[in-house]
Amino acid sequence: MDFFDSHAHLDDEKFEDDRDKLIEDIRKDNIEKVVTAGYSLDTSKKAIEIAKKYDFIYATCGISPNDIPQTEEELWKTLNEMQKIAKENSKVVAIGEIGLDYYWNKDNKELQKKAFIEQIKIANNLNLPIQIHTREAVMDTLEILKQNKAIKNGVFHCCSLNRELVKEGLKLGFYISFAGPITFKNSKNANEIINMIPNDRILIETDSPYLTPEPLRGKRNDPRNVKFMAKKIAEEKGLSIEEIANITYKNACKIFNIK
Ligand code: NI
């Protein structure tokens, strides 16, 4: 049984002391592939470094809505540089995480939208899918995705359990990736949302080191815990964990164009 963690942050400082050992351990524990995600210029570079070092790890490059510079001029500079490093590296499998976040940042909505749209264009230039981060910005996110087609499609990473987002996202052709929150005891509508997703559009991820799933909440998260997301989805869909592992593995290889 092979698992694909479609979104982790292996560059995170929480992995600083034991990163190499941890990566060896997760590889031995049936974690067959991991996408480590950038969210700023710096973390995009680190993600590439890690992906270059390990065969089974891939990277994304992107500037998240919470990491965009304060001025437009700085934004263009950053995006140009991001495009350059993404283009130069064959282990980069998506532009992300990109999107809108009105939970953490309400005061720069216009700049967030610009950064999002521009990075969809970058993904299209480079023939890559996008990995979307959206929080408390469902309508604007969907509007932008309708107006600015991501040619290679993409993934709603750590998808919020929002019916409208999932429904419209699926219509647009996107994949839905689930992280720890579907296992939390207070996630009331997880079963409904999980059952909205056809098997050929579902992915699993850890978003580690954050968002540790039940029953390990409170501990550092790492890609091995992607199994708990598979378990939860398997229960809801009436399938085996092995079936969910295979389905999500195949889907991730398809969207990230990994042979
Ligand atoms: Ni993330």
Image (cartoon, rainbow, N blue to C red):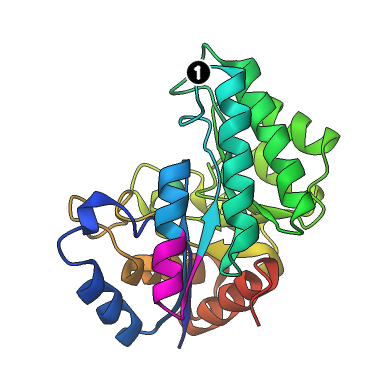
Q: Residue at x 61, y 61 (%)?
A: 88
The quarter of the rendered structure image containing the N terminus is: bottom left
Query: Does the beta carbon at disc 1 come under 8 Å from ligand 1?
Result: no
**Residue 158 position within the rendered picture, expressed as x and y whole percent measured from the top left:** 50, 49
The residue sitting at the top extreme is: 107
**Residue 96 position within the rendered picture, expressed as x and y whole percent measured from the top left:** 57, 48
Q: Residue at x 21, y 53 (%)?
A: 14
Q: Which residues are magenta?
A: 48-58
Q: Which residue is mark 1?
A: 70
| Residue 149 sits above or below residue 135 on the image | below
**Residue 87 position within the rendered picture, expressed as x and y whole percent measured from the top left:** 65, 58
Task: Kindly tell me whether residue 150 is visible in this rendering.
Answer: yes
Q: Is residue 78 left or right of residue 123?
A: left
Task: Kindly tell me whether residue 132 is visible in this rendering.
Answer: no
Q: Secondary structure at mark 1?
A: loop
- For label 1, the crowd category at 10 Å Cα-Cα, with few meaning under 14, some 14 to 19 and many 20 or more, is few
Which residue is nearer to you in this view: 209 or 11? 11
The quarter of the rendered structure image containing the C terminus is: bottom right
Instruction: Check disc 1 and give the amino acid type.
Output: Gln
Instruction: Quadrant for residue 62, please give it.
Output: top right
Q: Residue at x 29, y 54 (%)?
A: 209
**Residue 8 position within the rendered picture, expressed as x and y whole percent measured from the top left:** 41, 58
Which residue is nearer to you in this view: 198 or 103? 103
| Residue 30 sits above or below residue 212 on the image | below
Is 199 inside the magenta-drawn segment? no
Q: Residue at x 29, y 57 (%)?
A: 214
Is 53 inside the magenta-drawn segment? yes
The residue sitting at the left extreme is: 17
